Image: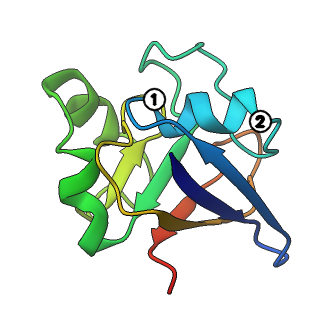
Amino acid sequence: MVSVTFKSADGEETIISVKTGVSIQEAAINNDVPGIDADCGGGCSCATCHVYVADEWLEKVGPPGELEASMLEVVEGSATLDLRFADQAVLRGAPPAKRAKQAAAERGHATSSKARPTG
């Protein structure tokens, strides 16, 4: 199990425990975490679940695939290497705790999250 803390732009935290092998989006949706819209249902086609993964965690969720990389090019802020779609970022072998900081959704666009270790 992996402990994930989603932190909203206003500082509210939602802590969940999930099995490794699920996407950040699945973890959020299955645990009623607000801000991860997932309009496409995990099809990597809408960008309503983009997240920012801390550098030290990029290897844990793996690099974006070809489709995701091409979709990320149209997302504001995509010049950073830490931007991922939560439906494509799978929690793999992460340490027992991880933090995710959510930014406010803007005009129907995805909420952003920042994943950080705790402890």
Kind of residue at disc 2: Asn
Say what secondary structure mark 2 lies in. Answer: loop
Reply above or below: 4 against 61: below
Bin the neighbour count of mark 2 within 10 Å (Cα to Cα): few under 14, some 14-19, many 20 and up: some
State the residue at coordinates (66%, 42%).
109
Say what secondary structure mark 1 lies in. Answer: loop
Q: Nearer the viewer, residue 112 or 109?
A: 112
State the residue at coordinates (24%, 59%).
58
Q: Nearer the viewer, residue 47 or 94?
A: 94
Reply above or below: 20 against 113: above
Q: CA distance from mark 1 to mark 2?
A: 12 Å
| Res 48 seen here | no
Which of the marked residues, 1 or 2, is nearer the chain's N terminus? 1
Q: Quadrant of residue 40?
A: top right
The residue singled out by tag 2 in the image is 31
* 18 with respect to 85 (left or right): right
* 54 with respect to 76 (left or right): left
Q: Position of residue 84 (x, y in %)?
A: 37, 46
* 19 with respect to 66 (left or right): right
| Res 49 seen here | yes
Q: Position of residue 41 (x, y in %)?
A: 59, 13
Q: How many marks?
A: 2
Q: Position of residue 8 (x, y in %)?
A: 76, 66
Reply above or below: 29 against 82: above
Q: Quadrant of residue 94?
A: bottom left
Q: Residue 22's mark?
A: 1
Bin the neighbour count of mark 1 within 10 Å (Cα to Cα): few under 14, some 14-19, many 20 and up: some
Q: Position of residue 79 (x, y in %)?
A: 26, 62
